[in-house]
Image: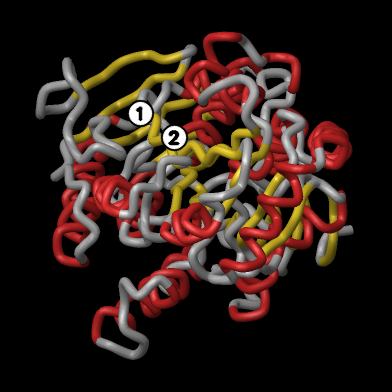
Amino acid sequence: MKLALLTQYYPPEIGAPQVRLSELARLLVQRGHDVTVLTALPNYPTGRIYPGYGRGIRREVLDGVRVIRAPIYPTQAVDFGRRMLSYGSFALAAGLVSAAALRAPDYLLVESPPLLLGLTGVWLAGLKRARMIFNVSDLWPDSAVRLGALRMNGAAHRLAVRLERFCYRRAWLVTGQSREIVADIAARFSECRTFHLSNGVDTRRFRPDLRTDASRALLGPGDRCVALYAGLHGLAQGLDQVLDAARELRGEAGLEIALAGDGPEKAALVRRAECETLSGVRFIAPRPHAQMPALLAAADIALVPLKEHLPGAVPSKLYEAMASGRPVVLVAEGEPAAIVREHEAGIVVRPGDTPALVDALRTLNRDPALRARLGANGRRAAEQHYDRFRISSRFIDFLETQLAPGGDGRGDESPTSRDVTDAGQTVAGVR
């Protein structure tokens, strides 16, 4: 089959959607399928086009996947105006470039957010007579409202709600990366066919045995217990609450907090740590994704914080920490909290509860046996339930079945019934 991926984010950028989508594309090629990725010139999270990519259209082949890169207005700014300008510039450029450069696919998978890219996807799917799969990684605009980026019932919010409805109803299939996302969409748009395409982790790449002297040296002295956050320093992560805990833990012997990565909030976090003389906090420059397995394995505790409860949001770094055999301190509610509690893979803290975060870090710092037990539980759960290869393989099986004789046929026809599918297994609507 022929499949196109429309996404603003793709390697060599680092980040959750970049890893997840590139691994899906690679597996599709390994299964003998034809894959083209329509994406932006790499610029995330620095807000600057990567060296060597120029400003125009760029074509390349990565792991057997054809990649077409369109221009974008790059920015690291968090204000609404410049962020929308960045989203809009790519949505427009991607539509123009792909109209001429993209061969008609059987499926067009559109990654959201940004929600605005759904407009490009709907238009392009119609133009190429492809089935549009709208892949929802975060429930926008709901998450934007919760994070304070949009005002509830303001003009921008009302427009985003209409855009969300338009994209869901025009999609042949809506996929969600968590059960909460799938349930939310199915409840509000009963006519939509939905599929639980769970996030996950490559359990062969992220393992507990990858710790090296070099990776440990990045985190700090070997005789200390290091709690590591590795990822985007952005608004949704709420890393200020980690610094709040670090301030209260100044007298805790043997504990260090390491924050690895980059993002729009990093400069402010560094300034705050310096002003408050938080000597137990270490900032580490972003590392290539290939180095992350060794870095996580070198840590003693994995920090996975969210600023607010974002329904449906399950950070990919949670799965990577579990696969690495690290005990998790999760600052979140909802589905990620349920995962950690169900598998006894760490300690759950409500967002904003600084005393509980302090207690969790102090408890794990003082109890190596507890760290080992929780880490082993997480590794076992990752292998059994969240292996990305198995998750992606079941999704590909499903897509292949739909094109086979006796499937739904091809083209842009919409399903006549709501088919709710969980990683290739029937949940409701399909017999």
Report whether 59 appears left or right of 228: left
The chosen color scheme is: secondary structure
Residue 399 appears in the figure: no
Quarter the C terminus occupies:
bottom right
Question: Disc 1 marks which amino acid?
Answer: Ala
Left or right of residue 167, residue 350 in this image: right
Q: How many marks?
A: 2
Q: Position of residue 212 (x, y in %)?
A: 62, 10
| SS of the residue under disc 2 | strand
Looking at the picture, does residue 101 appear above or below residue 80? above
> Residue 44 is drawn in which quadrant?
top left
- Secondary structure, mark 1, is loop
Rendering coords of residue 22 (x, y %): 50, 28
Badge 1 local density, few (<14 within 10 Å), some, or many (20+)?
few
With 78 as the anchor, is 420 left or right in this view?
right
- Residue at far top of view: 213
Which residue is located at x 28 percent, y 88 percent? 154
Residue nearest the observer in this picture, 370 or 35? 370
- In the image, residue 403 sits, relative to residue 131, either above or below, namely above
- Of the numbered discs 1 and 2, the one sitting upstream in the chain is 2
Mark 1 lies on residue: 285
Image quadrant for the N terminus? top right
The answer to whether residue 239 is above or below residue 405 is below
The residue located at (24%, 86%) in the rendering is 155
- Measured as percent of width and height from the top left, residue 270 is found at 30, 45
Q: Residue at x 36, y 87 (%)?
A: 152
Residue occupying image coordinates x 76% and y 43%: 366
Disc 2 target residue: 260
Q: Residue furthest bottom?
A: 153
The answer to whether marks 1 and 2 mark residues whose Cβ atoms lie closer than 8 Å is: yes
